[in-house]
Amino acid sequence: MLWGAFTLLLAVGGTGIVAYSVLVSTRTEIDQADSEDVAFVLNLCGLGEHRIERVLHSYVSPRSFTGDHVDAYAIKVSRIDLEKLTVGRDLGTHWYCGDSLPPPLSEALAFIDMFHHTVSWLPHSSALRGNASFIYPSRVVFHGGRVTAAELIFARPLENTIFYFSAKT
């Protein structure tokens, strides 16, 4: 009887996982995000959502059962205060200039190039390594010495554009 109950739980659990995978997490949303959907990006890095003009591009992939995903946004903003990027460490925010990255952040930046075929409008890491870009690392996960997940925000003050990238493999 115990074995039967265990088998039933496995069958119900397996069915639930398959149903979730098929019904919930199989939609890729391309260029469907609006300002409300991306407000968290500017709030996360301390810039404030009030400066969003429009969402230029968006890509939200389905989630796998283990959380694997690729999400990216390009956001046009009214202004980016250079002072907030270079001095704005008061609220726990820490922006790095693209031409002076610590090694772990440099590896995380290289990680995004693996996804350029999916989000071709996202700048290559080589374009983000100059002094015209600033990077805010929200989260970088290493496993076995390599980046397996990253959540990064990029500011391009000359273009008044913010890019958000989140992926887990």
Image (cartoon, rainbow, N blue to C red):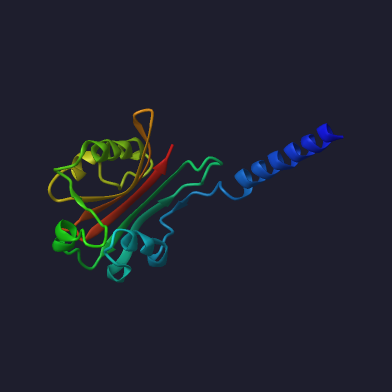
Residue reaching furthest top?
144
Q: Residue at x 82, y 32 (%)?
A: 3
Of 76 and 43, which appears nearest the observer?
43
Q: Is residue 9 left or right of residue 144?
A: right
Residue reaching furthest right?
1
Residue 141 in the image, given as x and y percentages of width and height: 37, 39
Q: Is residue 5 left or right of residue 35?
A: right
Residue 155 in the image, given as x and y percentages of width and height: 23, 55
Q: Which residue is drawn at 14% across and 62% down?
A: 83
Q: Which residue is drawn at 63% across and 49% down?
A: 23
Residue 13 sits in quarter: top right
Q: Can residue 158 be seen in this view?
A: no
Of 126 and 44, which appears nearest the observer?
44
Q: In this view, does 166 lie above or below 11?
A: below
Residue reaching furthest bottom?
50
Quadrant containing the N terminus is top right
Residue 89 sits in quarter: bottom left
Quadrant containing the C terminus is top left
Residue 6 in the image, given as x and y percentages of width and height: 77, 36
Q: In this view, does 113 lie to the left or right of 133?
A: right
Residue 80 sits in quarter: bottom left
Q: Can residue 80 be seen in this view?
A: yes
Residue 42 in the image, given as x and y percentages of width and height: 31, 62
Q: In this view, does 156 lie above or below 21?
A: below
Q: How many marks?
A: 0
